[in-house]
Image (spheres, grey):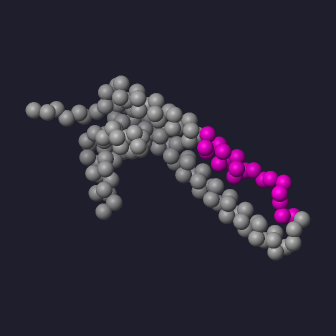
Amino acid sequence: MSTEKTRYSDQELEEFRQLIEKKLQKARQELDLLQSAFNYKDSNSTDDTSPTFKLLEDGSEIMTREEIGQLAMRQKKFIQNLEAALVRIQNKTYGICRETGKLIPKERLLAVPHATLSMEAKLKQNR
């Protein structure tokens, strides 16, 4: 008779917490960089160039700002997911698939520490 684990031990949860804290710190630093790049207006403006080049440069700058804005939004969502994972660790529900109720394999959580679905549930969801 094998007893299947229903949750990770406190020691394992602590390991995951440390991993997530490191990822969270790095993610926040990257978000700060993106936000400062988004808000930064350098002195290399197109004010002294011909109207044709000014239009091209301004269009390029707008696209770059939009891309940076999208990256910043993705980074914010990633940070929120990591923070939610920390709450699940605190509640001792971390690593439990929200669809199947089974324990998500440790390998998956090391690769995607904010995962809430096992691969089995994820694959069913994508069908």
The quadrant where residue 31 appears = top right
Outermost residue, left side: 1
- Provide residue 25's location: percent of width, then percent of height: 56, 35
- Position of the N terminus by quadrant: top left
The magenta segment: 29-47
101 is within the stretch colored magenta: no
- Give the answer, above or below, for where 32 lies relative to 48: above
The x, y position of residue 76, in whole percent, is 55, 47
Closer-to-camera residue (91/27): 27
**Which residue is outermost to the top?**
11
- 34 drawn magenta: yes
In screen coordinates, is 12 left or right of 18?
A: left
Quarter that holds the C terminus: bottom left
Q: How many marks?
A: 0
Residue occupying the point 36% across, 36% down: 94
Q: At 35% across and 29% down in the image, what residue appears?
A: 12
Q: Which residue is depicted at the point 37% across and 40% down?
A: 109
Point out residue 8 in the picture as x, y percentages from the top left corner.
31, 31
